[in-house]
Image: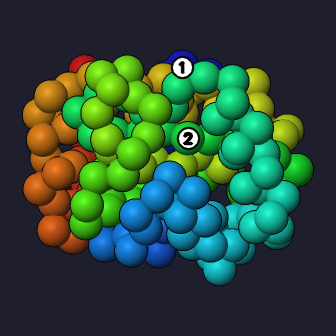
Amino acid sequence: MKLEEIDITKVITEELIDLNLKATTKMEVIEELTHLLYVNHCIDSEEGFIKDVLYREQEGVTGLEKGIAIPHGKSESVIKTTLAIGRTKQPVEWESLDDNPINIILLFAVKTSDATTVHIKLLQKVATLLADDEVLQSLQEVETKLEVINLLSKNNE
């Protein structure tokens, strides 16, 4: 399976995007996005999934640069590999490559059985998109959930 075969619109839906997160801490962000995954039947245990995300957080920095973080959980709790996206009103303290707080979070929920192929391809695809300053700037400015999906699904050649 080639990288471009991953259709990001299959793992991101408007129901999994919240551009007005109320969270003011890293933990609250993870809890709020996890709840979004739970109510949309992507995971079957909020507690189990959060535990796996926090375990992964201990392994290394998931905050990138320019206000973006990509926490992820490989978990038995995940029913469907997907991505929840949130934007906070105020920047949140988060370990990041540029030591700055973050306000855009892409939380990956990965089924244990998808862990090798799909997870890696999805991370690569998103990382490629996030390497584009224009995409990063647009993520800060988008006003609708559909704009987020369009932005992340645009062909990144």
**Quarter of the view holding residue 38:** bottom right
- Left or right of 6 in this view: 90: left
Measured as percent of width and height from the top left, residue 116 is found at 75, 25
Residue 52 visible in the displayed image: yes
Q: Answer with left or right where residue 46 lies relative to residue 112.
A: left
> Under tag 1, what secondary structure?
loop
Q: Is residue 117 visible?
A: no
Residue 132 location (% of width, % of height): 20, 26
Quadrant where the image shows the C terminus: top left
Q: Earlier in the sequence, mark 2 or mark 1?
A: 1
Would you name the residue on which mark 2 appears?
71
Seen in the image, is 109 located left or right of residue 25? right
- The residue nearer to you, when weighing 39 against 64, is 64
State the residue at coordinates (28%, 53%): 91
Q: Residue furthest bottom?
A: 39
Image position of 92 (left or right of 7):
left
> Which residue is painted at 19% across and 38% down in the image?
135
- Vertical placement of residue 128 versus 11, above or below: above
Q: Amino acid at mark 1?
A: Lys
* Viewer-side residue, 143 vs 91: 91
Q: Residues within 10 Å of mark 1 (few under 14, many from 20)?
A: few
Q: Is residue 70 above or below residue 28?
A: above
Q: Which residue bears the numbered disc 1?
A: 2
Label 2 to label 1: alpha-carbon separation: 24 Å
Q: Position of residue 61 (x, y in %)?
A: 53, 26
Residue pictured at 43% horizontal, 68% vertical: 23
Q: What element does badge 2 sit on?
A: loop
Looking at the picture, the colour scheme in use is rainbow
